[in-house]
Image: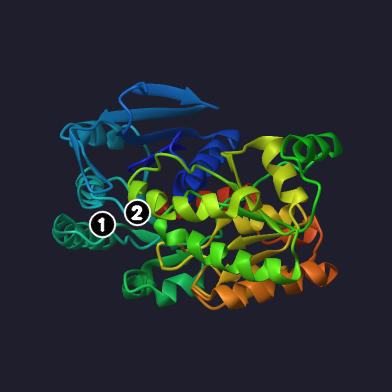
Amino acid sequence: MRILHVLSYYRPHISGLTIYVERLARGQVRAGHQVTVLTSQYDPSLPLHDDHAGVHIVRVPVMFRLSKGVIMPAFGIAARKLIRAHDIVHMHLPQFDGAGLAINARLLHKPALLTYHCDIQLPPALLNRVVHPVILSANHIAAIYAKKLVAYTDDYAKNSSYLSRYMQKLKVIPPPVEIEPPGDESIAAFRAKWDIKTHPIIGMVARLATEKGVEILLDALDIVRQSMPDARVLFAGPYQNVLGEEDYARRLQPRFAKAGSQWTFTGSLHGQELSAFYKNCAVTVLPSLNSTESFGLVQVESMLCGTPSICSNLPGVRVPVQTTGMGLVTPIGDAASLANAIIEVCRNRSRYVRDREYISQFYSTEKSVAQYESLYEELIRSK
């Protein structure tokens, strides 16, 4: 099967969406399919054509940006050429180009589906007041012309003002989640590298971005340290020059400086280093604030490494904890509740730990690949 994935940003840009598509695309290559990703050349230093793990990447030059969106005059030409050469068009929304993609797929008689990863919420600005309804309209047009819509969870779909309008076309497919089991040597090396001598270690894996609720964890840490003076946060993920989040980082910088050694940025982690990070944590947290977060792949990664996770009570985000029982759900933006949950899990950790096999029965890349493969075949037959 020849599969075309289309999204605005792809690797090496780091977000839940790019990681999702990378895992799915590589899993599909391993299953024997021909996979192409059409995306933006958001960084001019990136090649226009590239191959990684059998996935062919086509990048279109960016003329300029509107907020976090990218404007690519040559995108339509590249898209039509690739749509003709593939059996199925898989769009990943939100993205400005979704409407044109879905219409062109229909005109070229190619089945198209879209995975809706999350709502979009732009920073308050005059330009964004214009941009937001345009993107929303484009996403609705894409939904009308797409044959199927996919959501991570039924919980998020029912609570989404966008997805809830298209429930008759909706299919739920759990996201692809994978992480190497942590080895003893890598766990010890990580502990030495980051000078982990005291406990508990509270982990957070994310971009330093407004919707992630980093300030909620900062507030919670102050409370936790009143009863656990040695508590410390390790933050794994991009934290410098994050696209569109520069003001947010500057606003929080004095608080990071005040926390001192109780807050450590590790930068982005991969492979055994990431799994060792999870294993060295007593608990991980996802204190997200709004519906731009629809699930949280990092929660399941943490669980697969044997570490409980605490999350906000957001549709979709709460599902992994509710499904596995491996953690707690706290009210959105409530630092005191987050602190209490951290203390509870740290003091009674055995209550919240499940084995890797139990978590894997709900979430894995192989399961996601198989379900998408069945959906693709259904759409191609119906064409």
- Determine which of the numbered discs, if any, sits on residue 218 in the image: none
Q: Nearer the viewer, residue 101 or 116?
A: 116
Q: Nearer the viewer, mark 1 or mark 2?
A: 2
Do the residues bearing badges 1 and 2 touch, measured as CB atoms within 8 Å? Answer: yes
Dot placed on the residue nearer the N-terminal end, 1 or 2 = 2
**Residue drawn 84% across and 34% down?**
185
Q: Position of residue 99 (x, y in %)?
A: 21, 53
Does the image show residue 383? no
Q: In the image, residue 13 lies at what x, y percent?
A: 43, 38
Q: Residue at x 53, y 44 (%)?
A: 24
Q: Circle 1 — which element?
A: helix
Q: Residue furthest front?
A: 258
Q: Classify residue 175 as left or right of residue 224.
A: left
189 sits left or right of 139 in the view: right
Give the CA separation, mark 1 to mark 2: 9 Å
Taking the spot 36% from the left edge, 75% from the top edge, the residue there is: 164
In-image side of 44 versus 172 (left or right): left
Nearest to the observer: residue 34 or residue 355: 355
Q: Which amino acid, mark 2?
A: Leu
Instruction: Label 2: state its secondary structure.
Output: strand
Residue 87: x %, y % from top left: 38, 40
Residue beneath disc 2: 93
In this orientation, which residue lies closer to the viewer: 49 or 205?
A: 205
Q: Could you tell me residue 147's position as x and y percent?
A: 33, 58
Tell me the residue at 23%/47% (across/down): 97
Up/down of 49 relative to 244, above or below:
above
For disc 2, the neighbor class at 10 Å (few under 14, some 14 to 19, many from 20) is many
Reply above or below: 313 against 284: below
Q: Which residue is mark 1?
A: 142
Badge 1 amino acid: Ala
